[in-house]
Image: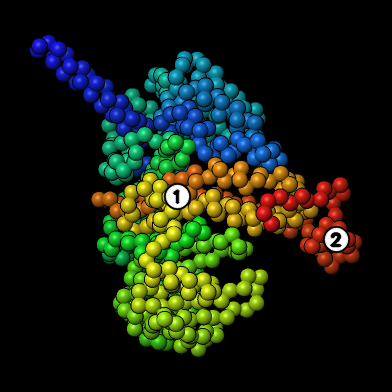
Amino acid sequence: MRRPLLLVIIGAVAAFAIWYALRLSEKSRSSTAAAFLPRETIVFVHVPDFNQTRGQWHQSDIYQLYSEPSVQEFLRKPLAALPKRNATMATLQEIEQLEAKDAFAAVTKIDNNNPKMVGGFHFRGSPADAENIIERWRSKLLTNNPAAKREKLQYERHQIDTITIAPFILATVFDGEWFFASNDLAELKSVLDRVDHRMKESTLEVDKDFRAAMAHMPSVYAAAFYLQPKFFTDKLASLRAGNGRNVSPDQLTMVEQMRSICVATRFERGKIHDVSFVGMPKLEDTKLARSSLTLGTKDTFLYLAMLLNLGQKFDAINQATGSATVGAGWQKALQAFARSGVSADDWKAAFGVELGAVADWPESIRWPGVFVTFPVLDAAKSGKVIESLTVSNPNGANWTQTEKDGVRYFSMTSAANLIAITPTIALSNRIVLGGLDPISVEAAVHRSEAGTSELGNSADYENAARSVPAPTNFFTYIDLPLLYTRLDSTLRPMLFMTAFVPQVAKYVDVNKLPAADIVVKHLSPIVSSQRYDGDGYVAESVGSITLNQSGAGLIALVALSTLGYQDMNSFVPNPLSKSTPTISPGSGTGKGYKPRNSPSPTPTGTP
């Protein structure tokens, strides 16, 4: 009887040991690469398993969208214009052959604005096969730079290969199944000293800020990024000291309070999950209530709630008045407050600190409506603040005031525009709410008073909100499928007009724009929450793309649009010149310019 029991216990202990070893190996992956870097490393990027990450990417919703035949057909022309795309694909395939693990890149220091960088990875297979692939990379570099100088030198038991293209240098070396590269020979030697345990200095692996940041990251991730802000905050402090301005610890900027910044990305059943951490002291004690969720409807594509204590920022805004850091709108508001005797204490007493924002886009209207709201703490003081901005402002626009069912409405008539708006502020005993027209603002006030939310009761919102931890100071929800559907319906007819612009047709065939339903079936809502967790702020975002990625994509889109606009301007001829044709914005026929053999657009989708 004892023997079977003993075998069961031994088996359980062995199973636990295997499980613990696997978990330990997962946790130690970032530590392996971090052990090769100095403690003062500024930037660290880590990819634990390149092939696994690439495989997960190919199973993601966004890649499935990219693989749609109609999307591939639409992207054929712009992708063909990308420089060296085939070479990039070939390099990725070679990295896949190497089965690269623990791939990392780092900026170890910055001297005189010259960053010292180092990177490397652990490969599978024979060193000879790896050497052949790396040698092809070196040969391409030498072929593209005939003036390059190549040398080999011995360091300890390693042979370092250097390629110099003055003033740039690339130093590479193999160490068993590891490959390392750097733009600084001394830095590469230091890495080898750490790998061979010849250097006893502290490494990034043991840095307390790094370890604290990585403790908030998931045990398994596709890629991670770490930034140590100390280098930049030290520069800021030295510049301030050079100007004779010293500040106390409680006057430090938010950046100067940051000890570390870390972001990790992983894939979950086709979705992307980002986890971000900023190590810093807690800035507020209030918790997010998300009371503005009642404003949401079935047509809401954006809901945001965050802690924003404007009362605490009055002094800083006042100090910045007149500088580029404060817009003209804020300056006028501060002037209006000063005339009416509204102080920071008045604002704090009048309004709560939770900002709510909702964007609705019903199918029946061409453009979305946006609402912004704060909770009201003191109705009398809130009225004083709003009046100072509107009817009591002699230099302001023409505002009118009405009252209905105990709610005061302040409306401003704007000049005639492409989009007619009548900015309206509603003030009740519970909330102050601003929107673009009085009808929608009044409807939002009624929803707030009813206390129920179409958005909050929807399955999509509930599922998305459950996928991230409960927030304490920031939350946002973006219904990406709804947003894309509305954008497609509104912008598709406008996009077809660009088919007559040669500089656009050169890169994009708008007639091949995929149908909205093909795109939407691969999209899911984006949700993001932020909370304070012991020693810093942790933010998590989940979706077919995440909030971080959508923000980066928006910046890239704006940059590309700017370049395209400049390119189009370079094409448009001087209207004062009689010898050049002009482009008619209304059509591609008649007196306007019409490219030869240009096909007529065939709009599809909802007009």
Q: Is residue 9 above or below residue 572?
A: above
Element assignment for label 2: loop
Asked which quadrant contains residue 263, the reply is: top left
The percent coordinates of residue 485 (x first, y second) are 59, 52
Residue at the right extreme, as displayed: 579
Q: Compared with residue 543, is residue 184 higher up or lower down, i.e. above or below?
A: above
* Residue 592 tag number: 2
Q: Tell me the number on the disc at residue 61.
A: none
Helix, strand or loop at mark 1: helix
- The local crowd at label 1, few if under 14, some if 14 to 19, many if 20 or more residues have their Cα within 10 Å, is few
Can you tell which quarter of the image residue 350 is in? bottom left
Q: How is the image coloured?
A: rainbow
Q: Residue 397, position in %: x, y?
A: 54, 83
Q: Residue at x 43, y 68 (%)?
A: 447
Along the line of sight, the residue nearer the viewer: 352 or 568 = 352
Q: Pick out the residue farthest to the left.
A: 2
In the picture, which quadrant includes the C terminus? bottom right
Q: Amino acid at mark 2?
A: Gly
**Left or right: 273 in relation to 141:** left
Q: Nearer the viewer, residue 348 or 373?
A: 373
| Mark 2 nearby-residue class (10 Å; few <14, some 14–19, many ≥20) | some
Q: What amino acid is found at the position of numbered circle 1 in the picture?
A: Asp
Q: Does residue 68 show up?
A: yes
534 lies above or below 400? above
Per the model, the C-alpha gap separating discs 1 and 2 is 48 Å
Q: Quadrant of the N terminus?
A: top left
Query: Going 37% across and 41% down the picture, which residue do you hit?
Result: 41
Dot placed on the residue nearer the N-terminal end, 1 or 2: 1
- Residue tagged by mark 1? 460
User: Can residue 186 be seen here?
Assistant: no
Q: Position of residue 598 (x, y in %)?
A: 83, 48
